[in-house]
């Protein structure tokens, strides 16, 4: 793909050069801030996520003040003002309402809203947007409209915006299709691993069934929820890993446990997920720590609870799916002798480690595809690549959600009312 032959310097940090026939305009010249407050009873609640603007999930944390939300109309651009939600923004395809921590902008008629969707979601603008914010600590860094309204961004002629959108829709769909194929491969590999585990821990599949006993979970271990830890103190780096309802959440300076343990997600979209952890770590109150008795080794416990598919026992709590510790402890299972547990765990380690390597390699391919998509979008919307004369063939449209298999954000709820 060729570059523009005639460019000009801008003296703007995040876009140092643009094509000479493009304009630089301030946000407040092209957008109107929508401030109208509405009730979620009249306008469907929407979530502002890193995948765009989506209907709010039923289990998302709800605000105590549901009558105090912002109106969003189809075509509005919505961006989360909090730095810990960096990248959570997009053009809404729906009418609805969002919480007050979001900025809602209505674009002028000279803008193609889909061009704006690509431009304002690219990583260069994201860095510029949050650079204009303020706050005491990184997780509470906030950018208000009054601080972003003078940010300059490039505006091509409308016909060129339309072509940029056609080109990017095509290329993004191609990449999303490949990502979707890779994600299906991962699901098949994970399914195969689960089947191997189930067969290994099934009493009826074994020859020496006399070594196996039918017991309730509470006879071979005890379980206890972890200790609450507010999200603001969980960092991207630190001394000890922090495990919550959906697995690893980040790192913290202290720990609650030291040794080899099984961690079960108690709350969240992935309630029932199982992790084997070793060393020092912090388990939050959204996770269950398994304390094995002398009749159960942690490595076998990991495979045992993975094979039991604990997610099927999750119930819908007020805000999100959850698991009852009492329910799990009263489930029945077949357990062999400790010697046989070690033998089975060794065999499963060997098989599952090989499958995990394949999964991790596939995830690396997905990451490279996502990086490629991000670079293409950024280069096109900032005028580094000229796509005006590139014909766009017929293609199958594949959006980000389809590529991700419909998966949403699996972050644990933060502060009620800030579910976006």
Image (spheres, helix red, strand yellow):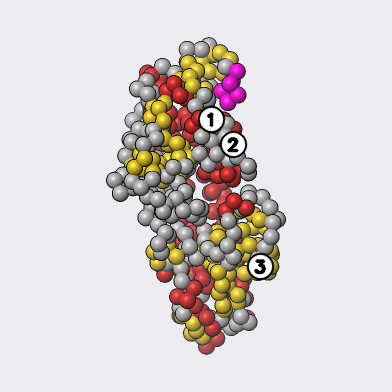
Task: Report the disc number at residue 134.
Answer: 2
**Which of the two discs, 1 and 2, labels the residue nearer the N terminus?**
2
Q: Residues within 10 Å of mark 2 (few under 14, many from 20)?
A: some
Is residue 170 something one can see in this rendering?
A: no
Say which residue label 1 marks: 147
- Cα distance in 3D space between marks 1 and 3: 44 Å
- Cα distance in 3D space between marks 1 and 2: 9 Å
- Residue 320, above or below 120: below
Tell me, yes or no, whether the two marked residues, 1 and 2, touch with CB atoms within 8 Å: yes
The x and y percentages for residue 222 are 56, 77
- Residue found 43% across the figure and 40% down from its top: 52
Query: Which residue is more in the foreground, 300 or 111?
Result: 111
Q: Residues within 10 Å of mark 1 (few under 14, many from 20)?
A: some
Q: From the viewer's perspective, is 414 left or right of 350?
A: left
Q: Nearer the viewer, mark 2 or mark 3?
A: 2
The x and y percentages for residue 81 are 50, 39
- Residue found 47% across the figure and 76% down from its top: 326
Say which residue label 3 marks: 257
Q: Nearer the viewer, mark 1 or mark 3?
A: 1
The x and y percentages for residue 103 are 45, 36
Tell me the magenta residue range. Answer: 11-16
Q: What SS does tag 2 mark?
A: loop
Is residue 289 something one can see in this rendering?
A: yes
The x and y percentages for residue 2 are 51, 19
Q: From the viewer's perspective, is 163 left or right of 262?
A: left
Query: Which residue is more in the foreground, 127 or 146?
Result: 146
- Residue 170, above or below 202: above
Task: Report the disc number at residue 64.
Answer: none
**Which of the two discs, 2 and 3, labels the residue nearer the N terminus?**
2
């Amino acid at each position: 793909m060729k570059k523009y032959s005639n460019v000009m310097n801008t003296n703007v940090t995040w876009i140092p050069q643009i094509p000479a026939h493009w304009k630089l305009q301030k946000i407040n010249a092209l957008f109107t801030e929508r401030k109208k407050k509405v009730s979620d009873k009249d306008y469907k609640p929407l979530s502002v996520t890193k995948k765009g603007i989506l209907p709010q999930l039923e289990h998302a944390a709800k605000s105590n003040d549901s009558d105090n939300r912002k109106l969003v109309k189809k075509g509005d651009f919505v961006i989360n003002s909090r730095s810990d939600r960096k990248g959570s923004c997009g053009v809404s395809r729906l009418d609805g309402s969002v919480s007050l921590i979001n900025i809602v902008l209505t674009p002028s008629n000279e803008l193609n809203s889909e061009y704006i969707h690509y431009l304002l979601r690219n990583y260069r603008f994201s860095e510029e947007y949050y650079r204009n914010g303020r706050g005491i600590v990184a997780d509470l860094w906030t950018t208000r409209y009054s601080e972003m309204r003078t940010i300059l961004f490039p505006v091509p002629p409308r016909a060129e915006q339309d072509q940029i959108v056609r080109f990017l829709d095509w290329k993004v769909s191609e990449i999303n299709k490949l990502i979707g194929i890779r994600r299906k491969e991962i699901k098949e590999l994970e399914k195969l691993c689960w089947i191997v585990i189930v067969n290994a821990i099934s009493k009826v599949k074994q020859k020496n069934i006399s070594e196996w006993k039918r017991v309730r979970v509470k006879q071979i271990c005890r379980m206890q929820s972890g200790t609450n830890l507010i999200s603001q103190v969980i960092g991207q780096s630190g001394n000890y890993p922090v495990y919550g309802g959906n697995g690893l959440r980040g790192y913290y300076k202290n720990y609650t446990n030291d040794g080899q343990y099984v961690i079960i997600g108690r709350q969240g979209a992935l309630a029932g997920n199982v992790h084997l952890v070793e060393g020092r770590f912090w388990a939050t109150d959204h996770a269950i720590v398994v304390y094995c008795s002398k009749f159960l080794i942690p490595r076998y416990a990991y495979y045992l609870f993975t094979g039991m598919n604990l997610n099927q026992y999750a119930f819908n709590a007020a805000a999100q799916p959850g698991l009852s510790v009492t329910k799990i402890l009263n489930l029945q299972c077949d357990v062999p002798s400790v010697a046989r547990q070690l033998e089975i765990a060794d065999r499963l380690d060997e098989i599952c480690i090989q499958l995990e390597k394949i999964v991790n390699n596939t995830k690396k391919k997905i990451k490279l595809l996502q990086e490629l998509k991000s670079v293409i979008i950024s280069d096109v919307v900032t005028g580094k690549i000229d796509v005006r004369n590139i014909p766009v063939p017929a293609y199958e449209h594949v959006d980000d959600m389809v590529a991700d298999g419909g998966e949403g954000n699996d972050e644990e709820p933060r502060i009620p009312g800030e579910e976006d």
